[in-house]
Amino acid sequence: MIFSLFCFLPLFDVLTYAEENLRASRLDCVRASEQCLREQACSTKYRTMRQCVAGGKESNFSRVAGVEARDECRSAMEALKQSPLYNCRCKRGMKKEKNCLRIYWGIYQSLQGNDFLEESPYEPVNKRLSDIFRLAPILGEPAVARENNCLTAAKACNLNDTCKKYRSAYISPCTSRVSTAEICNKRKCHKALRQFFDKVPPKHSYGMLFCSCPVSDQTACSERRRQTIVPVCSYEEKQKPNCLELQETCKTNYICRSRLADFLVNCMSEPRSLSGCLKENYADCLLAYSGLIGTVMTPNYLRSPKISVSPFCDCTNSGNKKDDCDKFTEFFTENTCLRNAIQAFGNGTDIGMRPPISPLQTTTSITTPYQKNRERNPNTIDNQINADPSLLHFCGNLQAQKLHSNATVDVCSSDPQAPKVDGPSASNAILRDSAVCRQSVGVTSLLPLLLYFGARGYL
């Protein structure tokens, strides 16, 4: 065990230093742009890049006239990869958010080739649902024991000055008729909704949006939850647009494009994960989902027996892109990660956290033959690490997470010749034909690994 710790601890120190150094050196895009413009060499390349993007609008600058001009564009992009602009991110709800996002997409739209899965421009928050409960839990008992949890959350909001202020600020424009033809000012309604979810503490805003409903009062409670965002103004339209067309409209707006990218990244489902989430973080998923509210891609609950959400669109008139449209809509309507995250918040639970008494079940528990054998023979000792299915599943979860970092380690592999997943085009790929467990390891992901092997006596 001591030998194993000597192997792991130096790596742990290196990863800690690397992660802290990356965060310390990364600026938001507004500050990074200002710093670049003060340096002559960076400023020249930055202005060249902006001219290239404005003139080309293509990832390979094919519309920029002349071979020399295209080479100059590529040279500018390569030079900017060494500047603070390349690593810059934005913070949701920051003072100059739109300007920050404009700078970000101006740089990265020429670097990202995957139209469906763009990188999130937002700085990771690194919070968990358990942090929200620990700060000020409003869920004292499991959802099945309460009458109407959504009504309780609304009352709690009215008792909090910040929540009450921003809730009133969106209720007014979202319910005020503008003319006989317009029932509200949707632009003002959307802006006020974004401010509500950006400014109000999650324990109150989430309490209203993700409240769980008891079986005895599903209809009324679910409808109250659905009405939280005043859907008649913020959500519904006279006619349902095509979802792919709505997605393209969203991408013309810096905030909508950014919030959608953030949602697609942080709510990615993974069937091999116990949580159902690729990133194993419910709080990140709920934050990303709430960030979409107040954009043209605003989602809301469907009137359905199960928890299911969707933007106000469908896949009619999709032509030969029907499969792409279905794939996009199913990311909302059939999203296991999001559904589990919403249920976990309503139950007052989190990943790796014991649920309260009589919780609503969020994931299915599967007992393997190996576990049944261990229950029948508790004194059985298994020294073969590869024979433990729970370890294989744990490794599968590590492969599933694939969190971004500067350092990667191979945790386990049953096939030394199995291929690696590298490169930006494969950043969201999952190897399903090999047993390789390759995870980008940061401080938060290495510690559970050490604890797991230590607890099972492998160290």
Image (cartoon, rainbow, N blue to C red):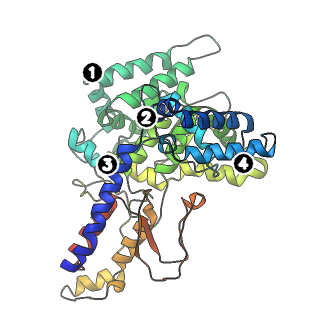
- Quarter assignment of residue 363: bottom left
The disc labelled 1 sits on which kind of residue? Asp
The disc labelled 4 sits on which kind of residue? Asn
Q: Earlier in the sequence, mark 3 or mark 4?
A: 4
Q: Earlier in the sequence, mark 4 or mark 2?
A: 4
| Mark 3, other Cα within 10 Å: few <14 / some 14–19 / many ≥20 | some
How far is the residue under mark 4 from the one under mark 2? 30 Å
Query: Label 1: which residue?
Result: 161
- Quarter assignment of residue 63: top right
Q: Which residue is found at the position 55% from the left and 63% from the top?
A: 429
Element type where label 3 sits in the image? loop
Q: Residue furthest right?
A: 66
Q: Earlier in the sequence, mark 3 or mark 1?
A: 3
How far is the residue under mark 3 from the one under mark 1? 24 Å
Q: Residue furthest front?
A: 40
The disc labelled 3 sits on which kind of residue? Arg
- Of badges 2 and 1, nearer the viewer stands 2
The disc labelled 2 sits on which kind of residue? Arg
Per the rendering, the mark at residue 128 is: 3
Query: Label 4: which residue?
Result: 60
Of the pair 440 and 143, the residue shown nearer to us? 440
Q: Which residue is found at the position 24% from the left and 82% from the top?
A: 375
Residue 323 falls left or right of residue 209: right
How far is the residue under mark 4 from the one under mark 1? 51 Å
How far is the residue under mark 3 from the one under mark 2? 17 Å
Q: Is residue 262 above or below residue 407?
A: above
Q: Earlier in the sequence, mark 4 or mark 1?
A: 4
Of the pair 319 and 118, the residue shown nearer to us? 118
Element type where label 2 sits in the image? loop
Per the rendering, the mark at residue 92 is: 2
Residue 106 percent across, percent down from the top left? 60, 36
